[in-house]
Amino acid sequence: MRFSVYRYNPEVDSGPRMQTYVLEQVPQGMMLLDALLEIKAQDETLSFRRSCGEGVCGSDALNINGRNGLACITPVADLKEPVEVRPLPGLPVVRDLVVDMDKFFHQYRAVQPYLIVHDPDPETERPQSPEDRDKLDGLYECILCGCCSMSCPSFWWNPDKFRGPAALLQAWRFLADSRDQATEHRLQELEGPYRMFRCHTIMNCVDVCPKGLNPTLAINNIKKLMLKHLV
Amino acid sequence: MNLECRKFDALVIGAGGGGLRAALQLSQADASVAVVSKVFPTRSHTVAAQGGMNAALANVSPDNWHWHMYDTVKGSDYLGDQDAIEYMCRAASHLVIELEHQGVPFSRLDNGKIYQRPFGGQSQNFGGAQAARTCAAADRTGHAILHTLYQQNIQARTHFFDEYFAIDLLMDKDGFVLGALVLRIETGELLIIEAKTTLLATGGVGRLFRTNTNARINTGDGMAMVLRAGIPLQDMEFFQFHPTGIAGKGMLITEGVRGEGGYLLNGDGERFMERYAPNAKDLASRDVVSRAIAVEVREGRGCGPDKDHVMLKLDHLGSEIIKKRLPGIRDTCITFLHIDPVEQPIPVFPTAHYTMGGIPTNRYGQVVVPVKQSPEEPIPGLYAVGECACVSVHGANRLGGNSLLDIVVFGRAAGNHIIEFLRENRYHRPMQNAQDSIDRALARLARWEQRREGETVDELRKELQKTMEFYCGVFRTRDVLEQGVKKMLEIEQRVAQATLRDHSQVFNTARIEALELENLVDTGLATVVSALAREESRGAHSREDFPERDDQRWLKHSLYYQEQNRLDYKPVRIKPLTVESFPPKPRVY
């Protein structure tokens, strides 16, 4: 099987290039991460991030044949040859398939992704009905891989000002939590032309999310809640 | 060599649940904290914990901490230290509730309380009916806890050094730990982080074995750093094989599947656990279930064309329960096996999972070593928590649901003790007195920069993993372990001659993997040497040539020193804090 992999090492390369690798054997069920590890065994100068290998840690988000996804849960059998493997688009490349995620994490931190409660803590757990808890499903599972934000043209253009789908999904995760007491504050923080309203419902984020989450729906829910608080 | 130096009150190495819980305690106490992690914090392996965290909340079945303590002592096959176990079980409820307050999205019962499920080795009333003690957020509890703790640290404005790899501890001539030498992966630059206290929270070493449930980052870095500093590792022969890894692949299938009512079948369609554990059946301790599966397969009652695994049946739970309580493992099965557990059973086999052994500590997280007559003298300034540490609350076998508890309880305890230490040790000690350890670490790094032909890191790592799996697996004998020690010593020699092809500075993951391989060699030797010496069967350590537990000779902790692969032993702390001790008795489920 043929792979065309983005290579760039700032210490020696004047610019990026694509390098072809061939794997003679492709066992059944091979994931792209397995293939990259085989390639690295041939050529240890290829750098990429990886850890859990089962789609829960979010390390190995890549652009695979033009589409963002996690290498460890992408079967190579489903991919057209040569498989083009590139770093996530929209962020500076550090080396090869490794991008600088600082701006992505900055936007995550900027939505205050933690429960804000003004009342004193009770001695026991705060009660939450199963129905209220269900509202967090599809939100808390985010693994911060970056597939969504780095597929979003609005984020490509304004990574400094637009929170991006991943961070906005987390903004809604806390707005939707029956235990959180900072609704007004959170909504105010998202006002203005950029922070949330740069979302143009392109829905690339929904299309690529490897966990099947829906940031666009979350953003819509925030907008609806804003409207409700206005009237 | 002039190295950049940064100064903090406290250094935390590792950003899983243990490191982050300690860092939070310190940040909230206004200590300056640096958290060094070789990956972005939410990539840490805590994220992969599925089933839950034990605490006797009694939300589902009658429960109290003392029953939890009994189960943990019994689960440890009486090698656990009962003071630490009492401390952990007493703290459990408080800490689960604290996590809830911090935002963990626990699953809920109809009355709004935290959902709890039954897990292996849990009983009511000291060995009675099955208890339901494991607090869960579906089957993504580790993810929920790790993200919440990271978020709490964002709020507390903890200082993070993401993607920095810790090379070695820096120790002065008086034996104080003064910080660590770390490598910034993005640039290849070295940095000294000076701190009045250093906490190791670097996780386990599941990557010792070819088939394992662990992330690729679990290479025992902190454990190996400790060995190289002349400090022993404790009870390394006790390595947990999880009964239900996906056969041949290793992905974890939570014990929560059996907690929710799933069970194991052999090739004859028999529910074989009834023979091995008539009462607890599929919810016996992990060591018991893993051995039972291995025996079934060995005696020709496995499933599949090669009869090399057993089946985990859960379709009878119904699609609603599976989708609600076990969505993560359902995804994993669909992705990696193309089967939907709503309809089909899952092929499983015991898979390397958890390091019970590790850096010896007391219940404050202080690293302790024998000095003269005292078996447990603290090393000033050095702490360890979580899977890399050995308090020991897990003894010879960890109960499911006790590791998320361990990291939070002892992360917090260590944080509190560090705050006290900082009060009494107000100033940094002079770094020039640690020059020897800086030089040694630099020499080790420089060795990899030699440019010549040699074996590759990748080849040697594969060989090491095969060796450990074959010579130090579920069942062990003297003959096989002796060969294992010999092979590991050979691999150690060959790693010393291995070479790197990539000598660049920017994000050189090959160099990191080389350093990780050294850590695997150090911890692998500790494991196999300790296993050869222990001539009894206890918990996860199962010697076919010594099939019985031998409390007369072996109710003691092993201590492995790297120098000459020397072993020492120290007594188990049998005395709890306030209650009567649980004396060893035959362990049946």
Image: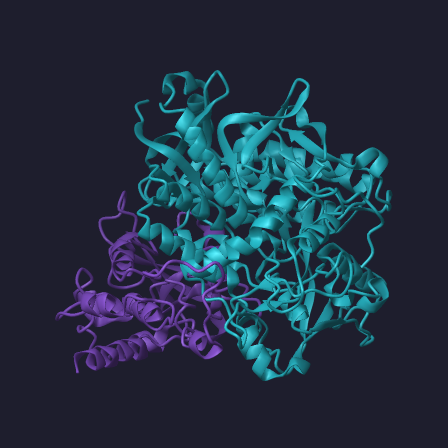
Chain colours: A purple, B cyan
B331 vs A218, nearest the viewer: A218
Q: Position of residue B113 (x, y in %)?
A: 52, 69
- Left or right side of B3 for A53: right
* Residue B587 visible to an observer of this rendering: yes
Q: In which quarter of the image is residue B281?
A: bottom right
* Residue B206 visible to an observer of this rendering: no
Q: Is residue B397 above or below residue B61?
A: above
Position of the C terminus of chain B, as image quadrant, is bottom right
A169 vs B161, nearest the viewer: A169
- Left or right side of B88 for B148: left
> Furthest-left residue in view?
A193
Q: Quadrant of residue B226?
A: top right
Q: Position of residue B22 (x, y in %)?
A: 45, 43
- Left or right side of B312 for B112: left
Numbered disc total:
0
Q: Where is residue B516 in the image (x, y as percent from the top left)?
A: 51, 41
